[in-house]
Amino acid sequence: MEKFTDWRDKGTGIAPFLPPTIKGPGIGLQIVYTLYIALSCILLSPVILLYSISGNSSLLLVILKVLVGWKADIVIQDVKRKDIQPAKHYPMKGSIYFCNLSSPLDAILLSLIAQNDLIFLIPDGSVLYKMNLQQLINFIMDGSLSPKKFGQEFSQYAQLKNYVTYLFPEGTCSNGKTVLPFNMKQDTLDELIEVSSSSLKIKTIYLKGNNTLVTPLGSSSKFAYLIKACWKSVTMKCKINNDDVKPSLDSIRITINDGDKYKLVSKNLNIESKKKFTQEFKSYRN
């Protein structure tokens, strides 16, 4: 991968757009996992049907545990594990949660822990695009470069008080080794706060999943990704900071990088740089 040194940060050595180098399971295991998924879906068909109708997160959790061995470690900053109460500490309406993004598993985890109706927001400069869970997953699997293709332009900021709002300020996926420069303007954040009459609280969530399942460039096949998730099993970590964060994009970026400012890549490794990398990587693979 020395060919892609132009997209490696000189200070940290991090190449934030490189996909996992590990290959998927061999053909034999692919057949085994295909049969396992098919059998599981048959056995889970009543649960899947109920979930498709109700959208109940508890049903989704059952499906995920059976299919991919789903495990999630939820940490609340400054709260002991034994004292964690989902209704009190998990994401709820009236707050906007800034989150990092590296795979569709992040979106799924966030949907599982939301205590109220939710929306996802992806910025593109001064514009925010609203997505539901399925739209966000499609956006991520497509390479996460065109929010306009999957979402709807959103400017009704006053409505956010009625939702659990997850905002991904990077505007795209990285490979989880850092937080990219934000594809969002400070003016947009200032306007969001002003229109909401300062009633929205700004909080942050740091997400970390399997390094082998990150999708900085998306995935050509959802089913192949599902097989890989079955093969590796899914282990997620979520760290929620419920303290109000200063409404500064620079401060927020450090916080959603788990507070480590020394592992932030330079601002030239932004979404425009990722677009160029994507073209170069695809031509290299072909």
Image (cartoon, rainbow, N blue to C red):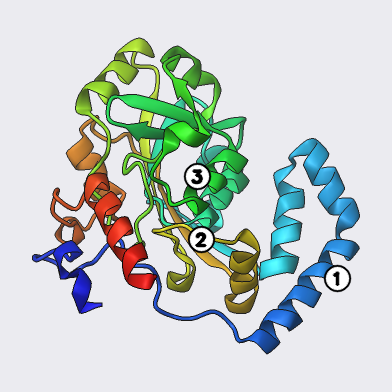
Which residue is pictured at 44% across the width and 13% down the height? 158
**Which element type, helix, strand or loop, lies under badge 1?**
helix
Q: Disc 2 and disc 1: Cα gap in Å?
A: 24 Å
Which amino acid, by three-letter code, is at mark 2?
Ser
**Which element type, helix, strand or loop, lies under badge 2?**
loop
Q: In which quarter of the image is residue 204?
A: top left
The residue where tag 2 is placed is 219
Where is residue 131 shown, x and y percent of the image?
A: 53, 33
Between 119 and 42, which is closer to the camera in this rendering?
Answer: 42
The residue where tag 3 is placed is 139
Q: Foreground mark, 2 or 1? A: 2
CA neighbours of label 2 inside 10 A, class few (<14), some (14 to 19), many (20+): some
The residue where tag 1 is placed is 39
Which residue is pictured at 24% across the width and 45% down the height? 272
Where is residue 239 shown, x and y percent of the image?
A: 42, 54
- Give the position of the N terminus as an image quadrant: bottom left
Q: In the image, 117: left or right of 101?
A: right
Where is residue 58 shown, x and y percent of the image?
A: 73, 49
Which residue is pictured at 27% across the width and 33% down the height? 184
Which residue is pictured at 39% across the width and 17% down the height? 199
Q: Is residue 177 visible to the viewer in this orientation of the structure?
A: no
Between 199 and 145, which is closer to the camera in this rendering?
Answer: 145
Query: Mark 1 vs mark 3: which is more N-terminal?
Result: 1
CA neighbours of label 3 inside 10 A, class few (<14), some (14 to 19), many (20+): many
